[in-house]
Amino acid sequence: MATLTTPGPAVTAGPGPTPVRRPRRGSARKRLEILLFVSPALILFVGFVILPVILAAVYSFFNLPPAFQWENLADSGRFVGFDNYVRALTSPEFQKAIGNTFFILVMSLLVQGPIAIAVALLLNRPLRGRGVLRLLIFVPYVLAEVIAGLAFKLILQPNGAVNATLEAIGLGTFAQNWLADPAVALWTIFFVLTWKYIGFAILLFLAGLQGIPEELAEAAQIDGASWWQIQRHITIPLLGPTIRIWAFLSIIGSLQVFDMVWVTVAPAVRRIATETMATYMVQQGQFAGQPGYGSAIAVILFVISLVIALIYQRFALRRDLKGALTNGAR
């Protein structure tokens, strides 16, 4: 005989144990590790970049003797305010130095860029001895500027190798006093700078070309596009980010040109024809015994470089920087 059973009350599961929140030791440890690894570079950056800029800005407001002590800054008659800046901006010599610097800057963009792109496109094609050619092109960039400057100083002398070669091939009428004639000295310096730095531009463009898919060129070739059309409409536009980065580096480097001009050209000719902002700063601040005036020139050079860098980043690199950010970083 079956027995009937009545169901008992339903048993419901009670709330589970409350999770114990552990202190966020991992986050604090991560910050400590970041600080530990960043501190050496940060100390060097502050000590060798930020602090000198601050000291130069302070010195620029004083009329300082060649040798001075920090505590002597408060001496009467030393503080001149913005007089050093007014003197620099109204000086014909400094204005000439600014013009020479921007001449090198503009010519570097107009001449070095197209030549480097053309050579990079050529070396990117299958070519016998391509590795050797790349090495030979990059060698000048590896040389120190002082060594390259002294070498060209010997080569470009009136009785040097360049004029001797022109005489030997019957072109003696084109022989010049390349580094002493104010009419050609600045162009000569630009040629030497191009020889020195174009290898870096070529190498940078070759690296950029490696990131362009070959399938795009092959598809365009199948559609009947010529080699020049492929380079013009596909390769060079895709090389745009690399070109903009090179242009930025070229602009900053041109504003800071010093070693090649200082070593290669004699002081008398340099003051007339090839003075740059950097060489004028060193000449006035170090050798003319005017550290306050030289500091003002250094601050002006820093401000010009910073403004140009910010403007270029705002209008030229903005698209590349946006593309480099992740959705979370935006």
Image (cartoon, grey):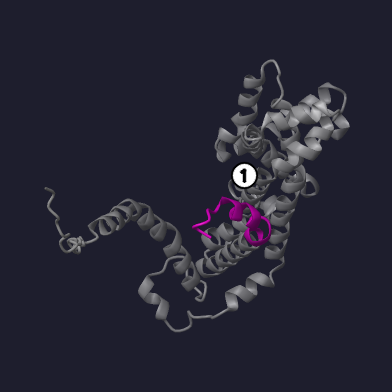
* Spot occupied by residue 187 in the image (x, y as percentages of width and height): 76, 45
Who is closer to the viewer here, 30 or 306?
30
Give residue 10's quadrant in the image. bottom left
Q: Which residues are magenta?
A: 312-330
Residue found farthest to the top: 128
Compared to residue 186, the image places residue 282 above or below, namely below
The quarter of the picture where residue 130 lies is top right
Q: Is residue 42 above or below residue 139?
A: below
Q: Residue sitting at 70 percent across and 29 percent down?
A: 215
Q: Residue at x 53, y 66 (%)?
A: 295
Viewer-proximal residue, 286 or 158?
286
Identify which amino acid the numbered label 1 is placed on: Met
Left or right: where 266 falls relative to 5: right
For residue 37, side relative to residue 53 (left or right): left
Q: Is residue 18 left or right of residue 250?
A: left
- In percent of width and height, residue 166 lies at 82, 27
Q: Which residue is the site of mark 1?
A: 260
User: Is 128 inside the magenta-drawn segment?
Assistant: no
Residue 206 in view of the camera: yes
